[in-house]
Amino acid sequence: MEKIAKLALEDGTVYTGMAFGAEGEVDGEVCFNTSMTGYQEILTDPSYRGQIVVMTYPEIGNYGVNEEDFESWKPHLAGFVVRERSRRVSNWRATGDLDQFLKRFGIVGLEGIDTRALVRRIRIHGAMKGVLSTVDLDDASLVAKAKASPGLVGRDLVREVLPPEAFEWHQPLSHWTKLNGQVLREIPPDAPHVVALDYGMKYNIARHLFNTGCRVTVLPGTATAEDVLKYRPDGVFLSNGPGDPEPVRYAQQTIAQLLGKVPIFGICLGHQLLALACGAKTFKMKFGHRGANQPVMNKDTGRVEITCQNHGFAVDPDTLPPYFEVTHWNLNDNTVEGLRHLEVPAFSVQYHPEASAGPHDSHYLFERFRQLIDEYRGAVAKSA
């Protein structure tokens, strides 16, 4: 027998549908994602910590879930909302369905509501705090809880998704097939060494770093500059992660101390933290960018890249110091999508070049990072 569930927003709007996945009650910021596929990657992306995610595509779950398409060790979002979940799974890699997956990890799901109306409300009024419940079905009670939810601003959610300790990464882009005839190679011991600061890093980012031919060591995002430099890195990567970058001050301090000592590449939260470490400011967006179809202009090439994005905060261009150059911007709302430091080897992008499922327009950024590392190593060798 199907069970009723409700989603209440802080503005008093309540949506009633059917529960799936785990039973319970969760709160978080309600946001939407426009991707048609990649729901397992969305569910397991640590950047969604503290959020209730609404999928705009009307049917979700038709290709099931598997044990390979995880972007972290477990789902991190608070709740999952769809118009309709597929009862039938059809994919040769599937090992289960969406309902079983959410039950396994304790994620509350809601289906059968008008997701188009919900997304329109968020687009008009902005992302809102909400409560998703299968246990409390009283509208007034749920709205009061939604208003009392802490939201994302000012919270350090990075500490909730950190890896427990440092580790070496050895997994290439694909275990089950080679991509485009690519030959997987062994990484020699004298290969460039990249230290990835993990603020909630997606696995596919580490795979891309590894596939550039670099040795990859992952450190928790709380690592100090001294901790990082002990590994004698040839490059430092700043990962994606959840929530508001401003309260993550320990990371900003580390980045500021690393600038000029080693090449740096940041993605998403790492992009924002790099800007903050250099004195810029960030701001909360009205409803953010979440989906696999965001158009971004590359200033260097004049080409438009279709990108996958997942962020609710952005860098304020008016606060950037003069030694920062904006290299990419969003064609939908003109927000900053890429930065380059003009005095030291450091650059960043707001979007996800590694996204899978997602477009491949920006894979070149990983090779650019490798090129920057090689140039820096060569310069150091000449001066030695």
Image (cartoon, helix red, strand yellow):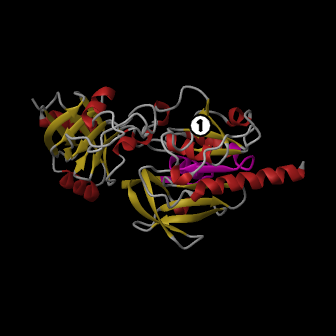
Q: Position of residue 178 (x, y in %)?
A: 52, 47
- The structure residue drawn at horizontal position 51% and vertical position 32%, both measured from the top left corner, is 162
Q: Tell me the quarter of the picture where residue 346 sits.
A: bottom right
Q: Position of residue 74 (x, y in %)?
A: 41, 31
Task: Characterize the local packing of mark 1: few (<14), some (14-19) or many (20 or more) Cα atoms within 10 angstroms.
Answer: few
- The structure residue drawn at horizontal position 75% and vertical position 53%, both measured from the top left corner, is 374
Along the viewing direction, whichever of 244 and 308 lies nearer the viewer: 308
Is residue 384 shown above or below 23? below
Q: Quadrant of the N terminus?
A: top left
Q: Report the side of 110 relative to 94 (left or right).
A: left
Q: Position of residue 198 (x, y in %)?
A: 56, 37
Residue at the disc numbered 1: 250
Is residue 173 shown above or below 3? below
Q: Is residue 281 magenta?
A: yes
Provide the residue span drawn in magenta: 257-282
> Element at badge 1?
helix
